[in-house]
Amino acid sequence: MIKGFIFDLDGVIVDTAKYHFLAWKQLADSLHIEFTETQNEQLKGISREKSLEKILNWGNTQVSTAEFNKLMDQKNKVYLSYIEKMDTSDILPDIPRVLNFLKQNKQAIALGSASKNAKHILKKTHLLEMFDVIIDGTSVAKAKPNPEVFLAAAKGLNILPKNCIVFEDAESGIEAANAAKMTSIGIGHPEILHNANDIFTDFTKISNEYLNNFISK
Ligand code: G16
Ligand code: MG
């Protein structure tokens, strides 16, 4: 049976989560707001706008709309400076094997990311052509944990949500996949992703046999 396999981008396909952190950290430092890696966990999977709102809240800082937009641009410029250096070596381990296996088995593959830079990153890593459908921060309004991004991906693939499998590294993403009534697979730490249907530290732990279980059902 053809299933819909939906991949988050940052932290699942590429390790850009570290670049988001570095860019937000630089911005927070310039505003004299304390910002830790633990706080950064809460920014994973959520939009640029929501991330800045949270950082400003943590720092009890209020800014005008114009300043807010300027700060978002500032963060994105720093983030893009990291992205410019990306190539195929930034693809996370075993992602090519998993994508190729699904393609060979004629499965439907989508991207479900909150990032407005998603297509740019997929181009830099030469992965764009692997995806039948791309839903990113430019095509959806409601941020994860809202299921909109994954429901739009399922619709684009023409596969029922219950026949979709989502790979996510963020708590908000697992919540979104669960709300969409899809199978949620957490990639990362069990203590953060405990609401997922299944959890793996990374794709090297996800065998072709495991993927085949979804396809043969
Ligand atoms: C990603 C990251 C988030 C980031 C968001 C927006 O989502 O996990 O930390 O805030 O994209 O990114 P941008 O500023 O590039 O539009 P995902 O869903 O791919 O993990
Ligand atoms: Mg992510």
Image (cartoon, rainbow, N blue to C red):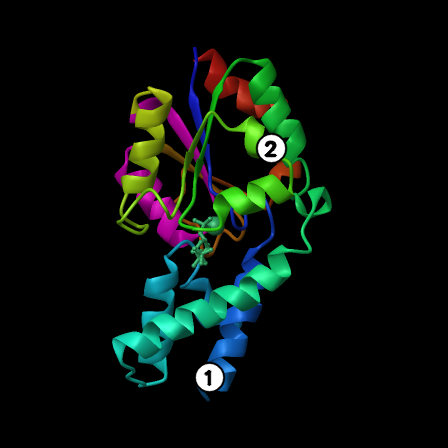
Q: From this viewpoint, which residue is outermost toward the bottom?
A: 32
129 magenta-colored? no
Quadrant that contains the C terminus: top left
Total numbered circles: 2
Q: Nearer the viewer, residue 75 or 91?
A: 75
**Which residue in the protein does label 2 denote?**
206
Mark earlier in primary sequence (1, 2): 1
Which residue is rendered at x = 70% and y = 42% of the image? 88
At label 1, counting other C-alpha atoms closer than 10 Å, the crowd grade (few under 14, some 14-19, many 20 or more) is few
Cβ–Cβ under 8 Å for marks 1 and 2? no
Quadrant that contains the N terminus: top left
* Quarter of the rendered structure image containing ligand 1: bottom left
Asked whether residue 159 is in view, the answer is yes
Q: Amino acid at mark 1?
A: Glu
Residues in magenta, as a range: 161-181
The label number, if any, that marks residue 119 in the structure image? none
Which residue is rendered at x = 32% and y = 50% of the image? 144
User: Which quarter of the picture shows residue 99?
Assistant: top right
Q: Is residue 136 above or below residue 105?
A: below
Which residue is rendered at x = 27% and y = 47% of the image? 146
Q: Amino acid at mark 2?
A: Ile
Q: Is residue 120 above or below residue 159?
A: below
Inter-mark Cα distance, 1 to 2: 37 Å
What element does badge 1 sit on? loop
Q: Nearer the viewer, residue 191 or 174?
A: 174
What element does badge 2 sit on? loop
Residue 75: x %, y % from top left:
48, 69
**Which residue in the protein does label 1 denote?**
34
Residue 108: x %, y % from top left:
46, 21
Residue 93: x %, y % from top left:
68, 41
Name the side, left or right, on which 94 lies relative to 167. right
